Image (cartoon, rainbow, N blue to C red):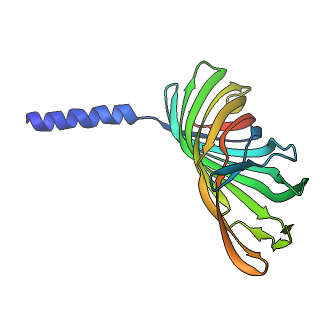
Amino acid sequence: MNKKLLFATLISLSNQAFAGSFAGSFGLGATAQKTTLEIEKNGNASEFEKDGNKGYFAGKALVSLGMKKGSSFFGVKLSASLMSDKKNLEVKIDGKDVETMNSKSNFAVHVGPEFGYQVNDKFSVHSAILLAYKHIEINQNALTIENVKVSAAKAEKECQYGFGATVAAFYSITKMFQVGLEGGADYMMKKENSFKTKVDDKDKEVKFDVKSNFAPHASVIAKISFGK
């Protein structure tokens, strides 16, 4: 009987601990983010920076779904960003600056657990730990270096993975409609990549590492919430 009573008590406590109502939100926003991009080959790193594009502005959509109990919310956050992050890499060849590569990134996704707390009727705060995915396309331009012709090529892999975190504060204009500010940062991990190119009409594979590392960002968001 004691074991049955203990089991029933644990079940009851678990139900109370996880009891809550389904809640969530969806929103749209604008993001400003500082980005960097480096190509590393044979231990030498070169940074894409010559066009002055140190970051980008992006449109952002996000959805949060989870459970709310009292003033606390715990769920999953999914966000997607559309942007135009373009960079060029210039190196000196025969004393002249020559654009050898360019990159373009136009899509990113984040997903992970989110915790929120309703401070009062008007203000709430949120934080999330996220996995990050970023689409990135890197192209090598056709070059002639010391009478050696190198053909144009496209990098084999077009993505980077990493992780990030965000914190946000929202003000409730109505019970369902909120506006707020969100800040955070991403850390994108080093990724191996390669070009399949031609050097003097002979096939050659050039391997390199792509690094973008630490990327802080800030967003203005308007969202609609549902659930008690």
Q: Which residue is drawn at 65% across and 59% down?
A: 208
Residue found at the far right of this picture: 96
Image coordinates of residue 151 in percent, x first then y, are: 81, 73
Q: Which of 105 and 222 is in front in this view?
A: 105
Towards the viewer: 18 or 76: 76
Residues 186 and 225: in front is 186
Q: In this view, does 47 lie to the left or right of 227?
A: right
Residue 161 position (above or below residue 163): below
Return the residue found at the far top.
120
Q: Where is residue 32 in the image (x, y as percent from the top left)?
A: 78, 38
Would residue 159 appear left or right of 87 to someone viewing this image? left
In the picture provided, is 74 more to the left or to the right than 89?
left
Q: In which quarter of the image is residue 2?
A: top left
Point 49% across, 26% down: residue: 70
130 horizontally vs 46: left or right:
left
Q: In which quarter of the image is the C terminus?
A: top right
- View extreme (bottom): residue: 201
Quarter of the image with the N terminus is top left
- The residue located at (75%, 39%) in the rendering is 33
Q: In this view, does 87 lie above or below 227?
A: below
Residue 68 rendering spot, x and y as whole percentages? 51, 33
Residue at the left extreme of this rendering: 1
Residue pictured at 81% horizontal, 57% vertical: 102
When the figure is inspected, residue 28 is found, relative to residue 39, above or below; the finding is: above
Q: Where is residue 73 in the image (x, y as percent from the top left)?
A: 52, 32
Q: Please give the count of numbered marks on the rendered protein.
A: 0
